[in-house]
Image (cartoon, grey):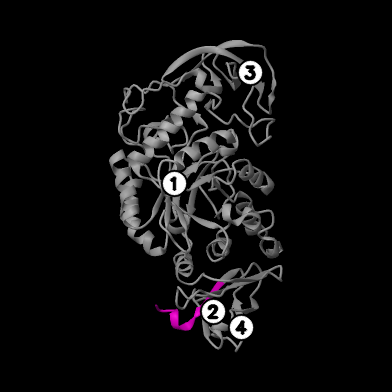
């Protein structure tokens, strides 16, 4: 990925992004603008064919080798476009000095081509370690032959020996959680998460990583993918459902293929226990960063609680607080947006505060969700079965916050987290970026202020609010101290007056 003093990722999609093969072309058009905003990396959705063809978001992975090239599942393009368009999008990112993070869905496969008959034991869906049946045979969709691709790129055939469980018995027309009885054992693989007894099984046909041929095929695919696309890194889906030894093996192999470092970002979604994330980082020996799910949850709770939330605790129980080098910080994502499985959208009023907390501080690698910049409108059914029209407005000050990160948020950080409703910090700036340095103040209550120090290098300078919300000027004293203000329920970012129009 490109070198940057202040890297920042954009998640260039959301769950309801319009279909009809638009996304790759949309990105090509937007790439220069994103680069101007200071984005250094783009995270793209899964680029391969899902079981729902042209409607698949991509997490129902069918054929990892079909990037919109073959007539499969009723379509040649994916929801996002053709392979040719995808490669042009990657090229556009690189041309604009942005790295590309590809989405790798390894936990399961969906949309098999043929039925197979094999032996299973049914398990308690609420305690997957408890069998609730004896051995019996079922017919299920577990054989993947990819007839549209016809062996191009890979002749590997996936069958029931490649899977540890399924959720549908086709011959008896019954859903459930079925543990496939195979040579690797009657139970699930050991995973880090003990939710539901054992959280190896998530959905569809669950991949069996104890099968060495499966691991070799996924390493072969990774090498093929790098050679075909020249992406720079990977976002790894649902890692808590996958045995950690597989990722240790796969990541080491991927990083052996090229001289440039290959970043890996794992999705380990646990909002309540940061120690679970820390344990996973430990067993994978720091090979991947993780999305800071607990931080998102803090933002969500704070946005609901308003002035009753103590902002001094906003980083409590978060990865960015405990191990910032391995934290990818987010406000929202495609799973937390309205009507989705982990629905917990941060309230609009708090988004500018939350974005400031991930973009303008020294710790963590921030990832900005597409609707925060572009907005989103869609219709779908909620968890109650009722239909809803959703409109997500773009965050109006986000472009300015991105400019603040790109031009000013550098150097030593001094924190002033000494009031439950008003917190602030300063960044002293660095010589390599002339005029850098900023002071940030935010409040979830009434109008607030902070007496804060910018450092001696800013002695007697005049600071103004880059966001234009406060009109007064702040005159720093001979030691670089000043009284910085912000409106209630708002944020202000103060910079040297001489830089305001540059």
State the residue at coordinates (45%, 77%): 434
Of residue 104 and residue 132, the one placed in the foreground of this image is 104
Q: Which residue is mark 3?
A: 186
Instruction: Residue 287: name its quadrant.
Output: top right
Q: Is residue 499 magenta?
A: yes
Q: Residues within 10 Å of mark 1 (few under 14, many from 20)?
A: many
Precedes in sequence: disc 4 or disc 3 = 3
Of the residues under marks 1 and 3, which one precedes in the sequence? 3
Mark 1–mark 3 Cα distance, whole angstroms, equals: 35 Å
- Find out whether residue 219 is within the magenta segment: no
Q: Are marks 1 and 4 in contact (CB under 8 Å)?
A: no
Does label 2 or label 4 sit earlier along the sequence? Answer: 2
Residue under numbered circle 2: 470
Give me the C-alpha separation between circle 2 and circle 3.
65 Å
Q: Secondary structure at mark 4?
A: strand
The residue segment tinted magenta is 492-502
Q: Are marks 2 and 3 in contact (CB under 8 Å)?
A: no
Q: Mark 2 or mark 1: which comes first in sequence?
A: 1
Q: Sequence-wise, which precedes: disc 2 or disc 3? A: 3
Residue 233 bears which disc, if any?
A: 1
Q: Nearer the viewer, mark 1 or mark 4?
A: 1
Left or right position of 438 against 307 = left
Asked whether disc 4 touches disc 3, contact meaning CB atoms under 8 Å apart, the reply is no
Q: Which residue is mark 4?
A: 482
Earlier sequence position, callout 1 versus callout 4: 1
78 w.r.t. 99: above or below: above
- Determine the residue positioned at 70% across, 65% down: 312
Camera-side mark, 2 or 3: 3
Image spot of residue 124 (x, y percent): 68, 23
**What percent of the width, then of the height, locates residue 414?**
63, 72
- 27 shown above or below 126: below
Q: Residues within 10 Å of mark 4 (few under 14, many from 20)?
A: many
């Amino acid at each position: 990925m490109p070198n940057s003093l202040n890297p920042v990722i954009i998640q260039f999609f959301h769950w309801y992004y319009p279909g009809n093969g638009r996304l790759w072309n949309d990105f090509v058009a937007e790439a220069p603008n994103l680069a101007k905003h200071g984005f250094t990396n783009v995270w793209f959705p899964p680029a391969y064919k899902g079981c729902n063809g042209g409607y698949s978001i991509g997490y129902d992975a069918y054929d990892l080798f079909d990037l919109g090239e073959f007539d499969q599942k009723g379509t040649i393009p994916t929801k996002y476009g053709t392979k040719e368009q995808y490669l042009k999008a990657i090229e556009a990112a690189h041309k604009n000095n942005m790295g590309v993070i590809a989405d790798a869905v390894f936990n399961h496969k969906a949309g098999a081509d043929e039925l197979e008959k094999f032996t299973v034991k049914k398990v308690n869906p609420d305690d997957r370690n408890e069998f609730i049946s004896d051995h019996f045979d079922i017919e299920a969709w577990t054989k993947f032959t990819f007839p549209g691709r016809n062996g191009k790129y890979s002749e590997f055939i996936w069958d029931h020996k490649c899977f540890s469980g399924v959720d549908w018995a086709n011959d008896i027309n019954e859903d459930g959680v079925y543990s496939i009885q195979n040579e690797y054992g009657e139970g699930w693989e050991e995973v880090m998460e003990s939710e539901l007894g054992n959280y190896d099984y998530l959905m569809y046909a669950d991949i069996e990583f104890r099968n060495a041929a499966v691991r070799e095929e996924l390493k072969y695919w990774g090498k093929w993918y790098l050679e075909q696309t020249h992406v720079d890194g990977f976002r790894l889906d649902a890692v808590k459902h996958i045995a950690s030894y597989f990722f240790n093996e796969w990541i080491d192999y991927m990083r052996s293929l090229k001289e440039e470092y290959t970043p890996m970002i794992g999705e380990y979604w646990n909002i309540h226990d940061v120690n679970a994330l820390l344990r996973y980082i430990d067993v994978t020996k720091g090979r991947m960063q993780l999305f800071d799910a607990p931080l998102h949850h803090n933002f969500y709770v704070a946005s609901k609680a308003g002035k009753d939330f103590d902002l001094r605790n906003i980083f409590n129980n978060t990865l960015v607080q405990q191990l910032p080098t391995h934290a990818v910080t987010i406000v929202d994502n495609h799973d937390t947006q309205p009507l989705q499985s982990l629905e917990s959208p941060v309230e609009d009023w708090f988004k500018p505060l939350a974005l400031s907390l991930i973009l303008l501080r020294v710790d963590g690698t921030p990832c900005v969700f597409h609707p925060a910049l572009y907005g989103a409108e869609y219709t779908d059914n909620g968890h109650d079965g009722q239909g809803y029209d959703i409109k997500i407005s773009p965050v109006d000050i986000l472009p300015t916050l991105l400019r603040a990160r790109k031009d000013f948020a550098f150097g030593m950080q001094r924190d002033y987290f000494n009031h439950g409703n008003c917190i602030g910090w300063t960044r002293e700036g660095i010589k390599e970026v002339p005029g850098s340095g900023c002071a940030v103040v935010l409040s979830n209550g009434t109008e607030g202020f902070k007496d804060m120090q910018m450092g001696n290098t800013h002695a007697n300078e005049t600071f103004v609010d880059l966001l234009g919300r406060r009109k007064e000027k702040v005159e720093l004293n001979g030691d670089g101290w000043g009284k910085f203000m912000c409106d209630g329920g708002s944020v202000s970012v103060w910079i040297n007056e001489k830089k305001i129009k540059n």
